[in-house]
Amino acid sequence: MGDMDGRIALVTGASQGLGAATARALAAAGAKVAVTDLRAPEDLAAEIGGIARAQDVTSEADWAATMDWIRTELGGLDVLVNNAGLWLFKPILETTLDDWRRLHAVNVEGVFLGTRAAIPMLAERAHLWRGGTAIVNLSSVAGIEGPSGEAATTAPRARCGCSPRAPPRSSLPPASASTRSTPG
């Protein structure tokens, strides 16, 4: 990661795995880190010197409350890491419509809601940093080459990561970046 001293980052889905590792790496690089998940990852926040809260990424109201919380507690936002995601280990013939809708709500709509909620705050601080502010959307290699029998999971994760520059640059603050990462 480069030098993150003074930057403020939010990592969703940070209770475990890649989200927790990302939060640790950002903190180690000097960022002030806010972490969220359905259950607030308080232990992780204490470990990295960050802050934590419970958040449902499928809720517009929760996104608004999270942005207000970050502004109050940390003073703004420089990096959004849209990491929250679901994985469904079911063959498609056993996948219900409710399963499908929940996957899309978290893996696609959650990214949209987070990006939309964060852009105004990112815009306020983009001028402070060489390279501006950033949105990182984590996807999955499974979205490119799905594992056998897990087509229900593959489609929404692919949707999250199909465009490396989503959202369009015209939506972002000047000198800001949006990217995706597709870890294995």
Image (tube, helix red, strand yellow):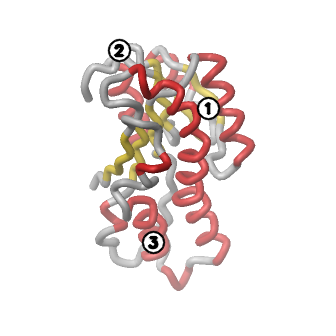
Front-most of 106 and 7? 7
Amino acid at the residue labelled 2: Asp
Q: Residue furthest right?
A: 61
Circle 2 — which element?
loop
Instruction: Look at the numbered disc 3 and give the secondary structure of its residue.
Output: helix
Q: Which residue shows up at 44% across the image and 63% down it?
A: 157
- From the viewer's perspective, is 136 left or right of 66? left
Does 51 sit above or below residue 16? Answer: above
Q: Which residue shows up at 48% across the image and 67% down it? A: 156
Q: Quadrant of the C terminus?
A: bottom left
Residue that label 3 marks: 155
For the residues marked 3 and 2, what is the alpha-carbon distance in whole angstroms?
A: 37 Å
The structure residue drawn at horizontal position 50% and vertical position 18%, both measured from the top left corner, is: 50
Kindly report which numbered mark, 1 or 3, lies closer to the viewer in this rendering: 3
Q: Position of residue 7 (x, y in %)?
A: 42, 20
Q: Earlier in the sequence, mark 1 or mark 2?
A: 2
Position of residue 82 measured from the top left corner of the image (x, y, whole percent) = 48, 45
Residue under circle 1?
A: 40
Q: Position of residue 37 (x, y in %)?
A: 58, 39
**Numbered disc in front, either 1 or 2:** 2
Which image quarter holds the N terminus?
top left
Classed neighbour count for the residue bearing mark 1: other residues with Cα under 10 Å, few (<14), some (14–19), many (≥20): some
> Which disc is residue 5 wearing?
2
Q: Is residue 28 visible?
A: no
